[in-house]
């Protein structure tokens, strides 16, 4: 195939999985593959990744001309934290591995919003265009969202499906042997501000216990302190999460 492939990832788990898939399929024997992360990634996250990944971080928004000049044939965005500029996606074939079932809940933390609005959850591999999580779909798969899933457990399911889709499609993507399709509809988009608004809990908000339960599990993601309220008496910030255990008996 003899392709120059750039992989930009800010997720150490997926990055290691990507490197493993490349090794399993002997992709690096016929192609030049380079791995980088962006300036928004914490270097500490990548201490245990192979040496092949430990390159200088890049700023995609500022260095896109340099990236174009390097003449990559394909760029993979593997949970990259930066939006690719229009000039970049119009110059190089860019592929996104996205933790959502496009076109539903495009943008930030699809699993959070799927828990709340009931839209389908899954993973998608798609071509990158000028809009966010918007390009033609190469492949995708639905994920069964259980009533006891939190943001974290749903996200972990997504990661495994993303790896499955990558292994299934990467050779065809590199060779150009793909058939992509436009999403059936525009879908919906959630931005960082939409997520931030969810995190501040209004203790006077009315609703059912089910709605409150969904909000808490949607914002529970391991040790992350997402949901909170401000105690009026002390002015202190109080963090909230939920612990869910399923009795398998």
Image (cartoon, grey):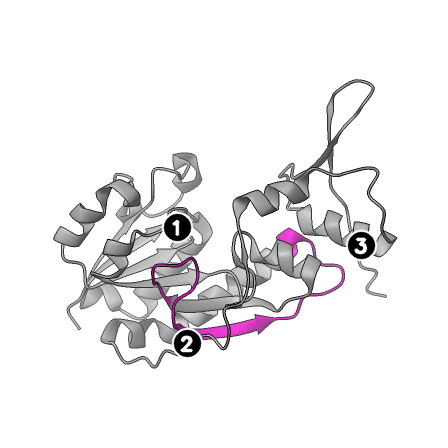
Name the residue that disc number 2 marks: 182
Q: CA distance from mark 2 to mark 3?
A: 33 Å
Q: Is residue 169 above or below residue 4?
A: below
Q: Residue furthest top?
A: 234
Q: Position of residue 9 (x, y in %)?
A: 37, 50
Name the residue that disc number 3 marks: 211
Tell which of 119 and 246 is nearer to you: 119
Q: Measuring 32% from the left and 79% from the top, which residue is drawn there?
A: 178
Dot 1: element = loop
Q: Position of residue 238 (x, y in %)?
A: 74, 29
Q: Measuring 47% from the left and 70% from the top, which residue is drawn there?
A: 164
Dot 3: element = helix
Which label is found at residue 80? 1
Q: Quadrant of the N terminus?
A: bottom left
Q: Nearer the viewer, mark 1 or mark 2?
A: 2
Q: Measuring 42% from the left and 64% from the top, which residue is drawn there?
A: 134
Q: Position of residue 222 (x, y in %)?
A: 64, 44
Is label 2 in contact with label 3 (beta carbons under 8 Å)?
no
Q: CA distance from mark 3 to mark 1?
A: 32 Å
Tell which of 247 and 113 is nearer to you: 113
Q: Nearer the viewer, mark 3 or mark 1?
A: 3
Q: Is residue 135 magenta?
A: yes
Q: Tag 3: Cα neighbours inside 10 Å, few (<14), some, or many (≥20)?
A: few
Residue 245 placement, left or right of 45: right
Q: Measuring 75% from the left and 20% from the top, which residue is drawn there?
A: 235
Asked if residue 54 shows in the view, the reply is no
Q: Position of residue 167 (x, y in %)?
A: 40, 71
Which label is found at residue 133? none
Q: Which residues are magenta?
A: 127-153
Q: Which quadrant holds residue 190?
A: bottom right
**First in sequence: mark 2 vs mark 3:** 2
């Amino acid at each position: 195939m003899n392709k120059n492939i750039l992989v930009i990832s800010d997720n150490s788990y997926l990055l290691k999985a990507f490197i493993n898939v490349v090794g399993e399929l002997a992709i690096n024997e016929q192609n030049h593959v380079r791995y980088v992360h962006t300036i928004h990634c914490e270097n500490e996250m990548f201490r245990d990744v192979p040496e092949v990944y430990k390159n200088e971080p890049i700023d995609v928004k500022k260095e896109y001309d340099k990236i174009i000049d390097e003449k990559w044939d394909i760029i993979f965005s593997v949970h990259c934290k930066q939006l690719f500029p229009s000039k970049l996606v119009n110059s190089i074939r860019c592929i996104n591995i996205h933790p959502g079932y496009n076109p539903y809940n495009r943008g930030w933390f699809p699993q959070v919003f799927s828990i709340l609005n009931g839209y389908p959850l899954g993973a998608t591999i798609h071509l990158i265009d000028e809009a966010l999580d918007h390009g033609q779909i190469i492949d995708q798969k639905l994920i069964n969202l259980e009533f006891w899933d939190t943001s974290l457990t749903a996200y972990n399911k997504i990661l495994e499906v993303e790896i499955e889709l990558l292994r299934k499609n990467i050779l065809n993507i590199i060779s150009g042997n793909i058939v992509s399709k436009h999403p059936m509809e525009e879908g919906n988009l959630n931005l960082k501000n939409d997520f931030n608004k969810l995190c501040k809990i209004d203790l006077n908000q009315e609703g059912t216990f089910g709605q409150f339960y969904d909000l808490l599990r949607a914002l529970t993601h391991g040790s992350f302190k997402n949901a909170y309220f401000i105690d009026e008496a002390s002015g202190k910030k109080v963090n909230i999460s939920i612990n869910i255990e399923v009795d398998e008996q």
